Amino acid sequence: MATPQFLSSFKYSDSLTVVAISFCTAIVCEAISWLLIYRTNSYKSLKSSIDKAAKKLETMKTDQNPNKLSTKKSKTKKIDRVESSLKESSRDLSLFKFKSGAVVALVLIVVFGFLNSLFEGKVVAKLPFKPIGIVMKMSHRGLKGEDSTDCSMVFLYFLCSISIRTNLQKFLGFSPPRGAAGAGLFPMPDPKTN
């Protein structure tokens, strides 16, 4: 039996069970991240240095004074230095977060296996639209039948995990610093070098 007895007669019990487990998993993952990352002094100093560098870069880019050519060149060099330090700090922050990523991934794999065994071959929701190709392969994964509006646990869990965890991070203040938004381990290439 996939759901507790008091929920089994409820029409949306399977869907709500998947959403509730996804919410609980997001809370557990953020607690692990807080324990391993967010409460440490090194994370706090990295985050503050990224915030300071992002603010400094923003003010340097908005404060344009086109008086002399030499000041423009020196300002460009200063902007490049601040950008490189921002990229380096963002990279360090990503590497710092990497250690908890393994633990969080393990938790997510265990929960996904548990949910997969509970809801294998079971329709947990109905989509209000007919999905396109690749989305239909995900939303209909493991289900028998030809109704493309049937939704499997995999698709619902995937959507819930992404949305709930992201919003929970913002609510708890654990979202990445705004200067580190596009950085990560694989940053966008610098257009100046081309």
Image: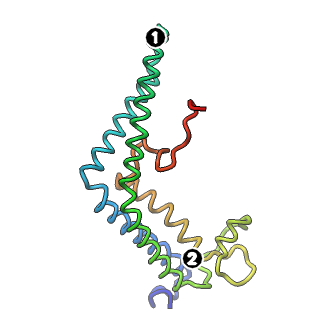
Pointer 1: what residue?
70
Judged by depth in the image, the label closer to the viewer, 2 or 1, is 1
Residue 8 on image: x %, y %: 50, 88
Q: Residue 37 appears in which quarter of the rendering?
A: bottom left
Residue 31 on image: x %, y %: 32, 65
User: In which quadrant of the rendered image does the C terminus lie?
Assistant: top right
Residue 152 appears left or right of 1: right
In-front residue for pair 38/99: 99
The disc at residue 128 is none
Residues packed near mark 1 inside 10 Å, few (<14), some (14 to 19) or many (20 plus): few
Q: Are marks 2 and 1 in contact (CB under 8 Å)?
A: no
Q: Is residue 192 above or below residue 101?
A: above
**Amino acid of disc 2:** Met
Q: Residue at x 30, y 55 (%)?
A: 38
Q: Is residue 137 above or below residue 72?
A: below
Residue 98 appears left or right of 126: left
Q: Residue 56 appears in which quarter of the rendering?
A: top left
In-front residue for pair 180/17: 180
Q: Residue at x 50, y 87 (%)?
A: 2
In-front residue for pair 144/16: 144
Pointer 2: what residue?
153
Sequence-earlier tag: 2 or 1? 1
Q: CA distance from mark 2 to mark 1?
A: 62 Å
Q: Is residue 93 above or below residue 157?
A: above
